[in-house]
Image (cartoon, rainbow, N blue to C red):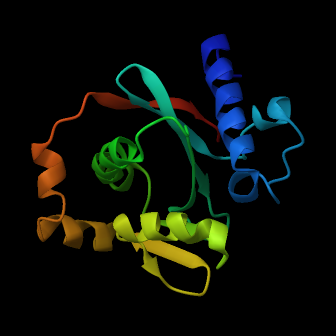
Amino acid sequence: HAADVDRAILRQAYVWAEAKSAIYLDGSGYRDAEDFLDPPRGSVEYFVFVGDKPAALLTLIPLVTVRGVYQVGLITNPQASLRKICKLLRGFMGAVFEQLAQALFVDLPARAEFSRTRKLARFFDFEQVSETIFLISKHGHAKEREKGHDAADRNDRLHGRVQVLRHHA
């Protein structure tokens, strides 16, 4: 189980999720904050900090049928700068592809409340492969980096970190 500090931040992430329950909680199967403390089987969870403040919870859930493919879950603090969170995560994606994943995907319904999230997926170079599925592969990420897509992010240093919370095999 997560340490007390980690559990407190997870409870806070649940409060963030409740603020936009249509996006984060509907259909998730979580009954309450305590239920939320138990991560999906095999998942890896990360806290994203901007400065010393928790800004997001990133969860990578393995696809059971294809090794090295993970579904991405991201719950953001409504008071945190989404721009700063995105910059930290863009830099972190390289490490995810180096150490863990061959591909990442998100399932985003074609509903109005998901329009900003769908734009965010495109910002991270996820390709829409069906009506609701967005995908980025290790190869696709490497091609975007070669084109210099991340140059501005590399030159603009940001005080923050992505800290592993727990890895559940």
Which residue appears at 43% of the width and 51% of the height?
A: 100
Residue closest to the far bottom = 130
Residue 7, above or below 131: above
Taking the image as drawn, is residue 109 in sight? yes
Vertical side of 63 occupied by 52: above or below: above
Which one is in front, 15 or 99?
15
Q: Is residue 15 left or right of residue 137?
A: right
Q: Quadrant of the N terminus?
A: top right
Judge whether residue 103 can be spotted in this image.
no
Q: Which quadrant of the view contains residue 163?
A: top left
Residue 76 image point, x, y percent = 54, 43
The x and y percentages for residue 14 are 71, 36
Above or below: residue 44 compared with residue 73:
above
Q: Residue at x 35, y 52 (%)?
A: 93
Q: Position of residue 36 (x, y in %)?
A: 77, 37
Locate residue 45 relative to residue 34 in the image: left or right: left
